[in-house]
Image (spheres, rainbow, N blue to C red):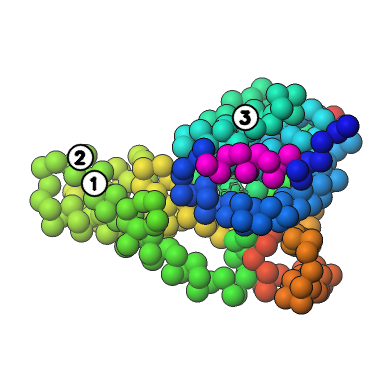
Amino acid sequence: MTPDPAAVLQDALAETRTRVRSPQFHKEYRLFLDRPAAISIVLDEVRYVLGLAPRGAAALLDVGCGYGLFTLAYSLLLPGRVVGIDWAHAKIADGRVLAASLAPQVRPRIVQGDAMRLPFRSSSLDVAVVRESISHIPEVEPLLEEIRRTLRPGGTVFIKDFNNEACLLEKNRLLRLWNEAEWRGTADAAAYVEARLGLLKREFPSESPDRLRWVARRTRGLYGARLRDASAQLFRDGRTDIEPAFHCRCPYTGYALERPFSPARLTSHLRRLGFSVRVLPPRHFRPHESGWKRNLARLLDSCVETLYPLTSPVTSLIQILALKRGT
Ligand SMILES: C[S@@+](CC[C@H](N)C(=O)[O-])C[C@H]1O[C@@H](n2cnc3c(N)ncnc32)[C@H](O)[C@@H]1O
């Protein structure tokens, strides 16, 4: 008898919860760890995405898979090869512990790597899923180029994110989040301004503490070579013409903290790359149990979905499906 995917995922989480100590794992999956029935949210979303995939799809990549719970669900529901990729070593290590709870024949491969340089052959994938990672990956252009390269003609990419630039309700939350990260730090990282200061001290050891701090404050959003070049200009000329493409990111890795974007811009970018694109109405997935609050939420969700794109300014959720043209 084929095992029930919900039971398999619930068992995997139950088995893993004591073996994975990372607080972030427990935070991200708290809902599913505390309420096993909520796993229906994951499976409903995965079934929905697979329903949009090309017929006979047999190779799927989950880009920026994190701890890989969704990757596991794809692996259980798609007969074929499923791979999750993420560049965070710690997440990959814990994701592998989670994946190890599945039987070898349905276990996805979880690999460490950079979504902007995918370690896969050209035209080797049928489906790419970019779930809540596009707003974090340092640069969108190389990511989309890599997806185009690795997808076969007729293959699809499904992009889901909660950072719709047009959503008015989100703006305050984001401003608070960015300022926190820049000046006070996040739960697992020091303030970005302090991180830049540390890098600058090593790069420009002869500069005074005051000048170093001044430059660290003026290089918000920069990382890598651009951070070095802008700092060198600032130390030399007192000004720089190098501007960040986005102002809230980790100075070491370029990881962007919830970079908002517009579905329209992303769509035209994908079209330029040779995709046919559909902006999908936002589809929310909620646990199956009832209760008036959940029913009300479902009712509101379905109004937003039915009236989309008119409702675009009230929903942060963006869902895009793009098909790589060509034969
Ligand atoms: C918010 S998490 C989403 C995780 C997962 N897709 C989910 O929906 O649960 C974003 C993930 O993107 C990953 N990420 C960011 N930049 C990346 C890159 N250049 N290559 C691969 N993964 C990246 C982060 O490490 C993080 O795990």
Q: Amino acid at mark 2?
A: Arg
Q: List the residue tagged with mark 2.
A: 202
Query: Between residues 207 and 283, which one lies in front from this camera angle?
Result: 283
Apparent side of residue 160 relative to residue 225 in the rendered image (left or right) = right
Mark drawn on residue 100: 3
Residue 230 position in % (x across, y down): 30, 48
The residue positioned 59% from the left and 75% from the top of the image is 169
* Quarter where residue 184 is shown: bottom left
Q: Amino acid at mark 1?
A: Gly
Secondary element type, mark 1: helix
Residue 167 position in % (x across, y down): 62, 70
The residue positioned 71% from the left and 51% from the top of the image is 39
Decide: is 309 above or below 206: below
The residue positioned 46% from the left and 69% from the top of the image is 175
Q: Which residues are magenta?
A: 8-18
| Pair 1/3: label in front | 3
CA gap, disc 2 to disc 3? 41 Å
Circles 2 and 3 in contact, beta carbons < 8 Å: no
Q: Is residue 5 magenta?
A: no
Helix, strand or loop for the magenta stretch, by majority: helix
Circles 2 and 1 in contact, beta carbons < 8 Å: yes
Residue 174 position in % (x across, y down): 49, 67
Decide: is 26 above or below 153: below
CA gap, disc 1 to disc 3? 38 Å
Q: Earlier in the sequence, mark 2 or mark 3?
A: 3
Apparent side of residue 11 relative to residue 234 in the rendered image (left or right) = right
The residue positioned 47% from the left and 34% from the top of the image is 89
Q: Is residue 173 visible?
A: yes
Q: Residues within 10 Å of mark 1 (few under 14, many from 20)?
A: some
